[in-house]
Image (cartoon, grey):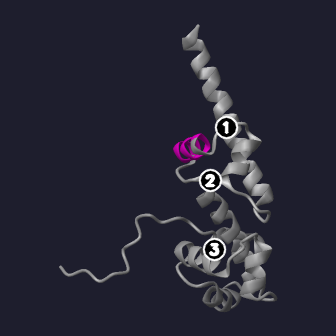
Amino acid sequence: MTSRGAPAQHLRDLARLRRVRDRIDREYARPLDVEALARGVHVSAGYLSRAFRAAYGESPYAYLMTRRIERAMALLRRGDLSVTEVCFAVGCQSLGTFSTRFTELVGMPPSTYRRLAAQATEGIPACVAKQVTRPVRNREAPDATPSLA
């Protein structure tokens, strides 16, 4: 009986994780933390973090920040909002944290991105620009520090 129960439990766990991911996708601009997300699916924050990372390759917080940065990129491409306005519009509470995470994901500060993206995506439909400029966590990117070899 337990051999049949394990796959069923695994499917229930995956469904929970999809609900968490979907909630992050929908509510990225609201104040969300791992504890609130875990309460929403009736598990502990530690369990949610471990299971989410195992299923999606990144923590719930990293996934949330990626969604926020993605939306910030779209708002910055429009060019009608300041970096500070975009920061708060996507749910970040700290301009410093927002700028740091943006730079990590995109490779340049938000102010530079705003200036360059407006020029680079001029005349391109928004749906195409979004796909082409989507941030990707690149854990294999070369280190910015010079090598001594």
Q: Nearer the viewer, mark 2 or mark 3?
A: 2
Main structural element of the magenta stretch: helix, strand or loop?
Answer: helix
Mark 2 and mark 1: span between their CA atoms?
A: 14 Å
Amino acid carrying label 2: it is Pro
Q: Residues within 10 Å of mark 1 (few under 14, many from 20)?
A: few
Mark 2 and mark 1 residues within 8 Å of each other at the beta carbon: no
Q: Residue furthest top?
A: 1
Residue at the spot of label 3: 133
Q: Quadrant of residue 86?
A: bottom right
Label 2 vs 1, first from the N-terminus: 1
Tell me where residue 26 appears, x and y as whole percent: 80, 56
Q: Is residue 131 left or right of residue 55?
A: right
Mark 1 and mark 3: span between their CA atoms?
A: 35 Å
Give the vertical position of 11 relative to 143 (above or below).
Answer: above
Q: Residues within 10 Å of mark 2 (few under 14, many from 20)?
A: many
Q: Is residue 55 left or right of residue 18?
A: left
Q: Residue at x 69, y 84 (%)?
A: 121
Q: Nearer the viewer, mark 1 or mark 3?
A: 1
Q: Residue at x 61, y 76 (%)?
A: 97
Front residue of 30 and 44? 44
Residue at the spot of label 2: 60
Q: Tell me the magenta residue range.
A: 47-55
Image quadrant holding the C terminus, namely: bottom left
Give the vertical position of 91 relative to 123 (above or below).
Answer: above
Residue at the spot of label 1: 43
Q: Residue furthest left?
A: 149
Q: Is residue 24 visible?
A: yes
